[in-house]
Image: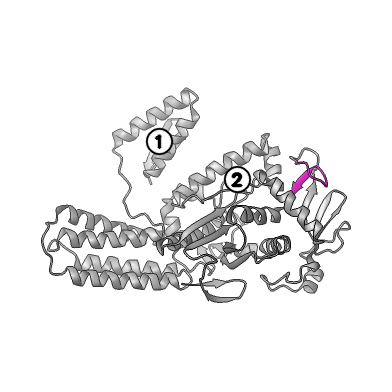
Amino acid sequence: MKLYNTMSRRKEEFVPTEPGKVKMYVCGPTVYNLIHIGNARPMIVFDTVRRYMEYKGYDVNFVSNFTDVDDKIIKKANEEGVTTKELTEHYIEECKKDMAGMNIKPATTHPLATQEIPGMIDMITTLIEKGYAYEKNGSVYFRVRKFSRYGMLSGKNLDELESGFRVAVDDEKEDPLDFVLWKPKKEGEPYWESPWSEGRPGWHIECSVMSKKYLGGEIDIHAGGEDLIFPHHENEIAQSEAANGETFSKYWMHNGFLNIDNRKMSKSEGNFFTVREISEVYDLQVLRFFMLSAHYRNPLNFSRELMESAKAGLDRIITAVKNLDYLAQNAKEFEDEKKDAVAAELAAYTKKFEDAMDDDFNTADAISVIFELVKYANTTINESNSKEVVTMVADQIKKLSDVLGVITEPKEELLDADIEALIEERQAARKARNFARADEIRDELKAKGILLEDTREGVKWKRA
């Protein structure tokens, strides 16, 4: 298995630090709003990497954090008149709902930044003791120039950085390149006690501490969007390796940017979409299938036309599985002379699928192999085959699709009477102010392809 290592800028053979085990850290979202489709790409991509590692027999310890304290969170909480804890707990739960809709497996551990403050204070203390950090007026900064390998991940030159517009001049710092590890509180902000001030950590330190705590020393894979290469991941490397005295991560993986109709996604452009908004138009399995239709390192363009194409492709696989399952239910048990030939064909398709995934997780080519397998099933497998052979083909399509996190079972169709009964139950729950149950029913119906709309005339529903 080969993967592209951002650090070396080439594909490398994957050799874990411990045989049979993979230690993987993926930077998670900052939870102050519903996640957007830009957040969704690394979630889907690295969930698929994890699934393939597990398919290959590795025991994967997968850690992905939630950043639950930062300037945007504080600003949003103040605007909504709630505590930062109330805000982040709400959006973590909403994020988990969207992740479930995209069939993203829960991480082995989902640590929260606010629960790891003591570990951050310990690491900052170590960096000060080693001379890599210094305190000034209650703030603590990392001495970038003291870490001689700074810039090795991004390929950035320190002198160029210093003259560049990215680095703001701060009179407190010894050097404009230095970055903050701890900052004093401002009026009305949440804060924690530390040896330097009542305040809170900088953003970069949290991932270094969480990775060390939940994965141990040198990890196998650290991953995220390519926008995190600099400064976030560069700073993580500097503080981790300075504090721990060992390599932080053996491999670095980064997914490419997501554009909307060939333009960069931004609220000001009016082309900003949350995953929840997409779910109102498409099943989130379509979004997952779309995200995997291109190589993860390539830029990906999101558009309605491409989503429709992804929907059609996914429907093609689901229909093939449905037809095979129907055949299997009605097929007879007998010694099928075609069994060995079919088994050989399946083995060839499986090898082709694995070759694609072994080549830096080329999901686009892997999906092409599944389509070839579907075509083979549609043109070769029929009523003349035994139950064993039909089931064998259906199971292989399901198995390879599952490696990609693609669900091949069609959603259960609800009868109109069942829908009306659930809507009545939801209305009763709302009247009783049991909003949790009302939301559960809405989500249950949405998962089954039924969209609700509350209007002045009452609740209206439609099939997605």
Q: Which mark is residue 176?
A: none
Q: Is residue 123 left or right of residue 404?
A: right
Query: Is residue 190 something that shows in the picture?
Result: yes
Q: Element type at marker 2?
A: loop
- Image point 53% across, 76% down: which residue? 11
User: Vertical placement of 190 versus 212: above or below?
Assistant: above
User: Vertical placement of 214 versus 15: above or below?
Assistant: above
Give the residue number, with chain letter if any, for mark 2: 33
Three-letter code, disc 2:
Asn
Residue 226 at x, y percent in the picture: 61, 65
The CA distance from mark 2 to mark 1 is 27 Å
Which residue, as the protein is rendered here, is positioned at the far bottom?
Answer: 10
Label 2 vs label 1, nearer the camera: 2
Q: Element type at marker 1?
A: strand
Majority secondary structure in the magenta region: loop
Quarter of the view holding residue 375: bottom left
Do the residues under discs 2 and 1 have CB atoms within 8 angstroms? no
Residue 95 at x, y percent in the picture: 53, 46
As for residue 256 lying within the magenta part, the answer is: no
What are the residue bounds of the magenta stretch? 192-202
Give the residue number, with chain letter if any, for mark 1: 460
Q: Is residue 354 left or right of residue 382?
A: right
Question: What count of labels does the image hold?
Answer: 2
Three-letter code, disc 1:
Lys
As for residue 198 lying within the magenta part, the answer is: yes
Residue 259 at x, y percent in the picture: 56, 63
Front position in the image: 216 or 261: 216
Quarter of the view holding residue 17: bottom right
Quarter of the view holding residue 420: top left
Q: Is residue 1 left or right of residue 25?
A: left
